[in-house]
Amino acid sequence: MTLENKINEFLTDNSYRVYSDKMTAAAFNAAQSHLDNLYDTRQEAGLDADGEDFLSDYYVARIVERVTDELYTTYKFDAKDNAFWVELKAIVDAHNNKAAA
C-alpha cells in the first residue's frame, strides 16, 4: 500500500475528529489541503491521476511538515501536542522505516 493510500485511509477513518477540537480540525484540514494541492499540481501537469504511482512518497511524506507549519503559523501551537498529528507522523515514519529496510 502506498503512503498516499495509507494517509487517505487515515483521513477517511478519522474525519469525525474534525469536530473534537480546534487544533485537531486545523491539523486535519492542513493534511487534506496538502493532499489536495498535490492532486491539483499533478492534474495541472497533465499526469495520469489514476496511475498506480500517482503521488511520490517523498511529496506525500511532507504532509507532516505541512501540518506542523500550519498549526504553528496560524495558532502558535506545537503540533507534537496534538494526538492527530502524532498518529499521522507515526504512519509516515512507519512507512519510511519499512521502505528503508
Image (cartoon, rainbow, N blue to C red):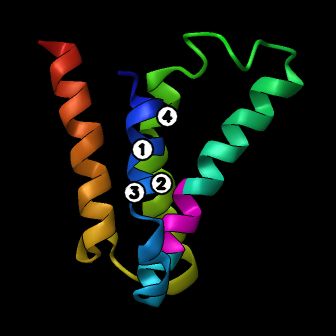
- Location of residue 78 by image quarter: bottom left
The disc labelled 3 sits on which kind of residue?
Answer: Asp
Q: Is there a contact, CB below 8 Å, between mark 2 and mark 1?
A: yes
Split into 4 quadrants, where in the image is the C terminus? top left
Q: Earlier in the sequence, mark 1 or mark 4?
A: 1
Q: Is there a contact, CB below 8 Å, between mark 1 and mark 4?
A: no
Between the C-alphas of marks 4 and 3, the distance is: 18 Å
Q: Which residues are magenta?
A: 26-31
Using residue 16 as the reference point, say whether residue 82 is left or right of it. left
Q: Position of residue 7 (x, y in %)?
A: 42, 42
- Location of residue 50 by image quarter: top right
Q: Is there a contact, CB below 8 Å, between mark 3 and mark 2?
A: yes
Using residue 47 as the reference point, say whether residue 18 is left or right of it. left
Read off the residue under disc 3: 13
Disc 2 crowd, CA 10 A, few/some/many (<14, 14-19, 20+): few
Read off the residue under disc 2: 12
Between the C-alphas of marks 4 and 2, the distance is: 16 Å
For marks 4 and 2, give the one nearer the viewer. Answer: 2
- Location of residue 24 by image quarter: bottom left
Read off the residue under disc 4: 60
Between the C-alphas of marks 3 and 1, the distance is: 6 Å
Q: Is there a contact, CB below 8 Å, between mark 3 and mark 1?
A: yes
Read off the residue under disc 1: 9
Question: Total of numbered circles in the picture?
Answer: 4
Disc 3 crowd, CA 10 A, few/some/many (<14, 14-19, 20+): few
Q: Judging from the image, what secondary structure is the residue with disc 1 in? A: helix
